[in-house]
Amino acid sequence: MGRIAAIARAVVTDAIRRRIMWVVALFALVLAAAIPMLPSYGQGIEGAVYREIALALVYVAMIVVALALAANRIPSEIERRTAYIVLVRQVRRWEYVVASWLGIVATLAAAAIIFGLIVFVTGWLVYAEPMWFLWQGVLAIWMEAAIVAAFCVAVSAVSTPVIVAVSALAFLFVTHVRTGLLGGPANPLWNFYPSLDTFNIIAPVAHGSGVSAAYLGAMAFTFAAWVAVLLVAGCVGFSRRDV
């Protein structure tokens, strides 16, 4: 665990060195400035519309950050030969893959908190009420971004950054078209189709009172299952790679 924690910290430090978090902060400021410019905002746009648009913007930002952090993480380390230095120090390859993902996820968590605070505080100031359910949406977005990061890490363990980015976009598309392809739960293939729809809770958060604790538990289980499968695939692929 000590080796994994050390590598994860190095990933976070590298993200800061590469000014990824500065980009996150800049995007957060742009987000804060852009939201009040929405049509009719000054005349009292409905809170539900605000929450829906704000969470949609946070989702796009988090996916972009996940791709920026994960698509080139392992390939760049191999190219710079930093990975060789780490692996010769009795670090197992699976530890390297898992630690890389953990470092990325920690950075994504910091980004999610920054984005969440922006939309939460803005909503509170404008509507004079704390929109606590926004944090459920931010949590769901962070989970999906972390799964996308796991997918990128798994593919990057055996491929190049360009293929990782294209594959990740295809992954997002495929995992969000279950309803369009299968119609609904009545289809016998519904429960076997790989989908990330579980994390799409923008509608209940924006137009309702959020989701129940049981649903949050289901999200956590789905998150753990996706991450486990993807990281195992990444570890297996990296163990077979000629490094």
Image (spheres, rainbow, N blue to C red):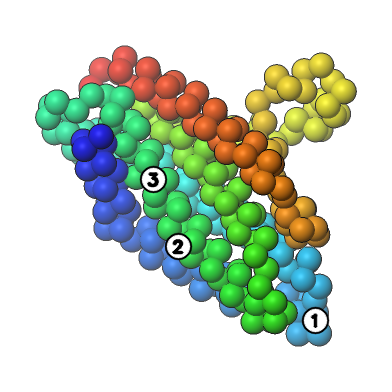
Residue positioned most to the bottom = 42
Q: Is residue 61 visible?
A: yes
From the viewer's perspective, is 30 left or right of 81?
right
Going 80% across and 81% down the picture, which residue do you hit? Answer: 44
Q: Is residue 17 above or below residue 180?
A: below
Q: Are marks 2 and 1 in contact (CB under 8 Å)?
A: no
| Mark closest to the chain's N terminus, 3 or 1 | 1
Residue located beneath label 2 in the image: 24
| Mark closest to the chain's N terminus, 2 or 1 | 2
Q: Nearer the viewer, mark 3 or mark 2?
A: 3
Q: Are marks 3 and 1 in contact (CB under 8 Å)?
A: no
Going 65% across and 65% down the picture, which residue do you hit? Answer: 132
Q: Amino acid at mark 2?
A: Val
Among the 4 quarters of the image, the one containing residue 153: top left
On residue 44, which mark appears?
A: 1
Q: Relative to the observer, which residue lies in front, 177 or 200?
A: 200
**Neighbour class for label 2 at 10 Å: few (<14), some, many (≥20)?**
many
Residue located beneath label 3 in the image: 104
Residue 129 pos. (x, y %): 70, 77
